[in-house]
Image: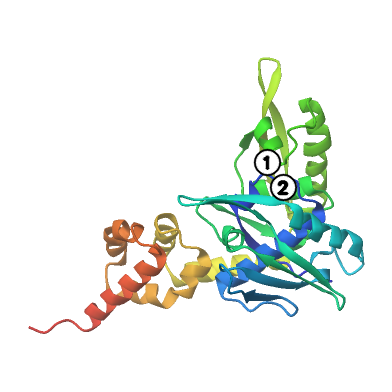
Amino acid sequence: MKVNNKLMIQSYLVTAARYDFSVYEKRIIYRLVEICQCALEGQQLNAGYRVNNLLYEGMKEIEMPISAFLKDEKDENYTLAKKALFDLNEKIMEYEDDEIWKPMRIIEVPKLIKKGSVKFILHKEIYDSLLNFSKGFRRIELRTAMEFESVYSMRFYELLSGKTEPITYRVEDLKIMFKLEDKYKLTADFVRRVVEPAQKEMAEKAPFSFTFTPVKHGKKVVSITFYPYMIPDNMDQDLERKRLEKELSLRWSLDKIYVDYLKQNYLFENDEIRNNLEVFKKAVGSMDLMNFLARKRRDAAQKKSPKGWIIGAIKRELKKVESPVKE
C-alpha cells in the first residue's frame, strides 16, 4: 500500500508514554493518530477506514485495512500483523482522573477479516488521549514514521520532531519511556544499542536527525543532550512546498501581529486561523481587534473551549459594530 505523506498531530501524552510497542504495534497507533487528525480537521476518512460510535460508555469500533499498518505494498507479513493486534490487546493502560481510576486494554476484541481488514474497539479514554493537547503536541510525517525499521527510531523521531534547540533527557527517564529499565545496566550499552541505531536510521530516512553529548555527574553519565539538525535531501519537497504555501497564504491574508497573538495567547493552529480567516479579516477592518483580544483573554481562559468562545465573541462584537443601537 502506498502511504500518502501528511503531517500528523500526536498527543505528547502518547509520544512520551511508557511502553514497549513493536514496530507493527506503533504503525497501528500511527494510523489511529491519523484517524483522530481527520476527526479534528473535519476531513473524510480514506476508503477502508471507519469509526463507529458504540452505545456502551462511549466506546468506538475502528476498522482499517490490514495494509494500513504494513510497511508498503511488498510487505505481506500478516503473521506479524496478527501478533501486533494480539499484543495490543494484551497491553494494559492505566487511566486516572479526579474521579476514577481504571485499567483498560489498549484495544479490545480485535478481529481480522479475511477480505483484508481488521476491526477492534477503543475505550473512550484511549481515543480521547489521542486528542489530548493539554501537554503539547508533536507533528510527524506519516510516511517517514511508517518506514522506520526500529521502534527506537520511531520514539526519537517523535520526541525530537519540531525541535530546533538542544534538549536534554535523563538516561533513566529515557529508559522508563522506552520501558528498558531492566536492560542495559551500562549507559554505554544503552547508547550503543538504542541511541546510535536510531541516530543512524533517522539520518538515512528522516528529514532530520541528531547528534548527542553525554552529560556526566562525576564519572557517571546521567543525561544525554540531543542536538537536532535538518537534512534537506531527506525532506518531502511536495509536503514542504504545501506547508510554505499555506503559511505564506495565511500571512498575506492576515498581518503577522494578529497571527502570532492568536497562536501565542489563544493557542490557535494555522488551520484553525485559516478556517476563521474571514471573521478575523472583517474584525481587523471594523474594530480594534488586538485590544479586543487582549481584553477578552481572561474571560476566554475560563471557558471550556476558549478558541470557540473568542470566535463567537468577535462575531457578537461585529454585529454591534454593524448594527449600532440608535438613540
Determine whether, in the image, residue 213 is placed left or right of residue 100.
Answer: right
Q: Say whether residue 87 is visible.
A: yes
Instruction: Name the amino acid type tagged 2.
Output: Arg
- Foreground residue, 182 or 36? 182
Image vertical order of residue 57 relative to residue 264, above or below: below
| Coordinates of residue 285 in the picture (x, y in percent) | 32, 75
User: Which quadrant is home to the N terminus?
Assistant: bottom right
Question: Horizontally, is 327 left or right of 82 in the view?
Answer: left
User: Can residue 224 be seen in this snapshot?
Assistant: no
Residue 40 quadrant: bottom right
Q: Amino acid at mark 1?
A: Met
On the picture, is 324 further left or further right than 194?
A: left
Residue at x-position 55% and y-position 66%:
247
The residue singled out by tag 1 in the image is 177
Q: Which mark is residue 155?
A: 2
Q: Residues within 10 Å of mark 2 (few under 14, many from 20)?
A: some
Where disc 2 sits, the SS reads helix
